[in-house]
Amino acid sequence: MWVCSKCAEPLPGRGWHCPNGHWRPTSSTPTGSFLQGFLGSFVFCLVIAAAVVFTRFQRENPWDPLSHRVFAILVLLGFAYFGIDNLRNAGKWRRMGGAIAAAAPRARGRAVGDFVVLGISLLAILLLVLMGKTSSLW
Ligand SMILES: [Zn+2]
């Protein structure tokens, strides 16, 4: 089930707006379990992280090492923002109660799945730095 995160109204059926006129693409959120949120965001973030690594290993690499590092750091900051935002929403929605409270566990799962990928990425970068491989690998 989808819920409007602005007014906490459940969203039946289809359409672009909630019953109170909020724009659904930016204000709706799905309810669900911690595991649903975790798996969804874990896979999503892992695919993005793999894509970032992949761009570094293409035969005709369009990236110079510096711009690839800047790009990788921006993606990691994006992960951090996504995780913090979901954690904040999870706390807020649980306090609001009602229909939107059912979306809180899924948001918390999204945050944790995202933080796991962020942690793996940071650990991988740390390992590369420790191994002195930074110039060739990221
Ligand atoms: Zn609404």
Image: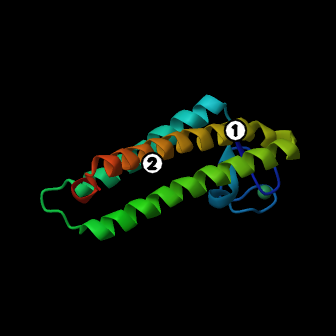
| Mark 2: secondary structure | helix
Using the numbered discs, state the Cα–Cα distance from disc 2 to disc 1 in whole angstroms.
30 Å
Q: Name the colouring of the figure.
A: rainbow
Q: Is residue 105 above or below residue 57?
A: above
Disc 2 marks a residue whose amino acid type is: Leu
- Residue 130 in the image, given as x and y percentages of width and height: 34, 48
Relative side of 108 to 101, left or right: left
- Residue 73 in the image, given as x and y percentages of width and height: 43, 61
Quarter location, residue 106: top right
Relative side of 55 to 49, left or right: left
**Residue matched to label 2:** 122
Estimate how packed mark 2 is, as few (under 14), some (14 to 19) or many (20 or more) residues with alpha carbons within 10 Å.
some
Q: Residue at x 69, y 57 (%)?
A: 27
Say whether residue 98 is visible. Answer: yes
Quarter location, residue 127: top left
**Residue matched to label 1:** 31
Disc 1 marks a residue whose amino acid type is: Thr
Relative side of 19 to 138, left or right: right
- Residue 124 in the image, given as x and y percentages of width and height: 38, 44
| Mark 1: secondary structure | loop
- Residue 81 in the image, given as x and y percentages of width and height: 59, 57
Tell me which numbered mark, 2 or 1, is placed earlier along the sequence: 1
Kindly check if marks 2 and 1 are in contact, taking CB atoms under 8 A apart as contact. Answer: no
Q: Residue at x 66, y 54 (%)?
A: 85
